[in-house]
Amino acid sequence: MAKHNILGNAGENAAIEYLLKKGYKILSRNKRYGYLEIDIIAEYEDILVFVEVKSRSGTYFEQPFQAVNFKKQKRIIKAANIYIEENEIELEARFDIISIIEKNGKFKIEHIEDAFYPRV
């Protein structure tokens, strides 16, 4: 497995651990619909939360959350709509980003709630 994949998996594991400690209920991980993917789907205080996790080993070029551009947001929103319809969910939905920077085996986690919104 490539180094960036190992970091990505470790980052997602750290994000799930973080969310569980905060009281989130994890519903799904790495949910795929063809080329669309949602890293984490959780429920928190009657809100359905779709979480994109971005992990980096440094911030040389950009902060991890900056990699969630408009195109990526559109794909996450599209996958979220499929998930909601498929599961007949009537909860309010929110889109979060968890930005993780790994340094010397330790993770610095930044959780950005309501990071982006579906555009009309």
Image (tube, helix red, strand yellow):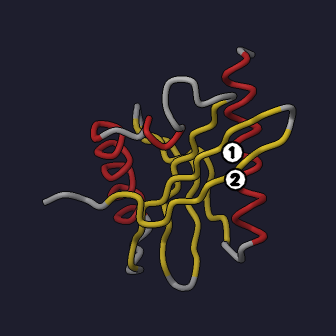
Image position, residue 86 (x, y; %) = 39, 61
Q: Quadrant of the N terminus?
A: top right
Q: Is residue 64 left or right of residue 103?
A: left
Q: Could you say which is closer to the camera, residue 60 or residue 39?
A: 60
10 Å neighbourhood of mark 2: few (<14), some, or many (≥20)? many
Q: Are marks 2 and 1 in contact (CB under 8 Å)?
A: yes
Kindly identify the amino acid type of the residue bearing the numbered disc 1: Glu
Image position, residue 38 (x, y; %) = 49, 47
Q: Is residue 120 above or below residue 22?
A: above
| Gap between marks 2 and 1 measured at Cα | 5 Å
> Residue most toward the bottom?
45
Residue at 28%, 36% in the rendered image: 71
Residue at 38%, 47% in the rendered image: 76
10 Å neighbourhood of mark 1: few (<14), some, or many (≥20)? many
Residue at 57%, 40% in the rendered image: 54
Q: Is residue 2 left or right of residue 104?
A: left
The numbered disc on residue 15 is 2
Q: Secondary structure at mark 1?
A: helix
Q: Quadrant of the C terminus?
A: bottom left
The number of callouts visible is 2
Please give the residue where the numbered disc 1 appears in the rendered image: 12
Image position, residue 79 (x, y; %) = 38, 49
The numbered disc on residue 59 is none
Q: Could you say which is closer to the camera, residue 99 or residue 86?
A: 99
Kindly identify the amino acid type of the residue bearing the numbered disc 2: Ala
Q: Secondary structure at mark 2?
A: helix
> Residue most toward the top?
2
Q: Is residue 89 above or below residue 101?
A: below
